[in-house]
């Protein structure tokens, strides 16, 4: 029963969540933490970090971690197939149409408009994540240190063009140094 539930949950997430893996985080959190209670918020937050550091798409990695947490290897496979199947079906269909009309002026204009929406969805996911995890609840040393780690990470990515994996590792080490 849990295998079917994992498959159907991630199938639904895969069908309704648009904007890429990071934009899916609020919906995955709602389903995994709030609706099903498969993980605590703390476990979910930790999983985001590990999924982000792992190779592959973060949403698929998260599905695999949740499935493994709930039902072992079979759960990981069921959740991963559920997450990937909608994308596979949709992108094959869209790809067949897109490559026939991608030079169309209206299509090009709509793609420029979608870029802003995707950026907004990712920013929304970050803000919701910060609020739900108490990172912006009150001004304290914890909040200030989180803001400084965020700002340093953003600067390293944007200004110094550092690889995201190195930022994740360094941020983890800073976390150990500050919060241990």
Image (cartoon, rainbow, N blue to C red):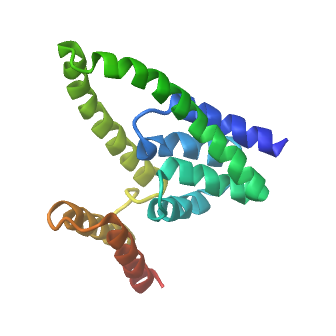
Residue displayed at 45% across by 45% down: 21
Q: Identify whether 147 is placed above or below 67.
A: below
In the image shown, does 23 or 94 lie closer to the viewer? 94
Q: Where residue 102 sits in the image (x, y, percent)?
A: 26, 21
Q: Is residue 9 left or right of residue 165?
A: right
Q: Nearer the viewer, residue 42 or 135?
A: 42
Coordinates of residue 3 in the picture (x, y in percent): 79, 44
- Quadrant (top left, top right, bottom left, bottom right) of the N terminus: top right
The structure residue drawn at horizontal position 63% and vertical position 57%, both measured from the top left corner, is 65
Residue farthest along the left direction in this orientation:
159
- Number of marks present in the image shown: 0
Residue situated in front as seen by the camera: 98 or 110: 98
Is there any visible trace of residue 159 in the rendered image? yes
- Image point 52% across, 33% down: which residue? 87
Snapshot quadrant of residue 34? top right
Q: Residue at x 51, y 59 (%)?
A: 51
| Residue 173 rendering spot, x and y as whole percentages | 40, 81
Q: Quadrant of residue 121?
A: top left
Q: Is residue 7 above or below residue 43?
A: above
Would you place residue 157 above or below residue 84 in this image?
below
Q: Is residue 141 visible?
A: no
Where is residue 135? Give x, y as percent: 40, 60
User: Horizontal placement of 13 versus 134: left or right?
Assistant: right
């Amino acid at each position: 029963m849990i295998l079917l539930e994992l498959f159907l949950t991630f199938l639904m997430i895969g069908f309704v969540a648009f904007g890429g893996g990071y934009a899916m985080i609020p919906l995955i959190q709602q389903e995994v933490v709030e609706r099903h209670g498969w993980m605590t918020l703390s476990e979910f937050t930790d999983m985001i970090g590990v999924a982000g550091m792992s190779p592959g798409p973060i949403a698929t990695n998260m599905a695999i971690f949740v499935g493994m947490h709930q039902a072992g290897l079979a759960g990981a496979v069921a959740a991963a197939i559920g997450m990937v199947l909608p994308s596979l079906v949709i992108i094959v269909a869209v790809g067949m149409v897109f490559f026939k009309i991608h030079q169309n002026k209206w299509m090009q204009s709509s793609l420029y408009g979608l870029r802003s929406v995707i950026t907004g969805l990712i920013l929304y996911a970050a803000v919701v994540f910060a609020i739900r995890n108490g990172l912006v609840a009150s001004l304290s040393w914890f909040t200030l240190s989180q803001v400084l780690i965020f700002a340093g990470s953003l600067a390293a990515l944007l200004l110094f063009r550092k690889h995201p994996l190195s930022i994740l590792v360094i941020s983890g080490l800073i976390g150990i140094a500050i919060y241990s």
